[in-house]
Image: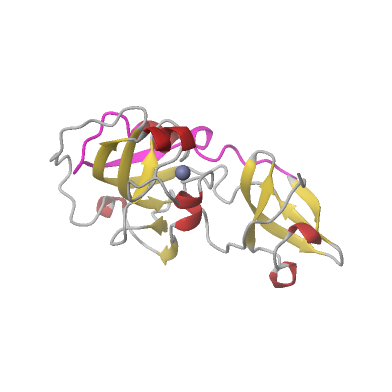
Amino acid sequence: MMGTQVQRISYRRSIGLQCSTIYLACGVSKRLKRVKGIGRESKGVEGSEAGSKTGSMKVAKNSVVYLRYRLEDDNGEVLEDNLGEAAVAVLQGQGNVIPGLDRSLLGRVSGERYTVQIPPDLGYGPRQDNHIQRVSKKYFNQPHRLKPGMQTQLQTEQGRRTVTVHKVGGKVIDVDMNHPLAGMHLNFSVEIDVVREATPTEIAHRHAHADGHDHH
Ligand code: ZN
């Protein structure tokens, strides 16, 4: 097994949904939006009826939850959303998404909309100073495309990790190992679409299969 290896290049932030499953953060297109000036009063999913509840099955451990979300920073800047796109499927309780978002799903029902502010400890952790690591270019997929400030992903023994390019050398690239969202409060507006029980295969795989079929 190689030490580190880049799976793919990503210039997008990888949201609260960790890249621990192919389907979630990696397969689902996340548009990075730069929408300035959204005030707190406009927070919430567009067209939402706060607190509306239309379903009956409550989210519990190993529920599969189909959801849409919007993620904002503390300045109200939209970092990401998948509103208007296909809902993402999350297997609750299996570390598919950051802990704060995972926990916030418990007890929810389909049709429910809510907002939750997730502190760094339940998100991507605190930002560490001088968290620079020197990595051989051979572990990057397309190192010639990388420039300082760009984000990319490294495959580590702890899973895939989003890093920021700090400096590009001849044979090595220095990367900031802090996740781009480390140290930040993550303000999610969540819209629960469907809740269903996981299949035994999904539980065995520890991730949801979006269409409910056990193939990838
Ligand atoms: Zn699977």
Residue 43 magenta-highlighted: no
Is residue 96 in view from this perspective?
Answer: yes
Q: Is residue 196 left or right of 173 when viewed as pictured?
A: left
Camera-nearest residue between 164 and 29? 29
The colour scheme of the drawn protein is: secondary structure
Camera-nearest residue between 160 and 205? 205
Picture coordinates of residue 174 (x, y %)? 78, 56
Write the residue at 49% across / 33% down: 122
Residue segment shown in magenta: 104-130
Question: In the picture shown, does residue 197 fall above or below 192?
Answer: above
Q: Quick one: quadrant of the N terminus?
A: top right
Q: How many marks?
A: 0
Which residue of the protein is positioned furthest toward the right in this rendering? Answer: 170
Classified by dominant secondary structure, the portion drawn in magenta counts as loop
Where is residue 110, by image quadrant?
top left
Write the residue at 25% across / 39% down: 195
Q: Is residue 13 left or right of 129 when viewed as pictured?
A: left
Question: In the picture shown, does residue 62 fall above or below 147?
Answer: above
Picture coordinates of residue 79 (x, y %)? 44, 57
Picture coordinates of residue 18 (x, y %)? 51, 45
Picture coordinates of residue 152 (x, y %)? 64, 59
Camera-nearest residue between 75 and 170? 170
Write the residue at 33% across / 59% down: 38
Write the residue at 31% across / 47% down: 67
Where is residue 47, by image quadrant?
bottom left
Is residue 95 in view from this perspective?
Answer: no
Residue 108 magenta-highlighted: yes
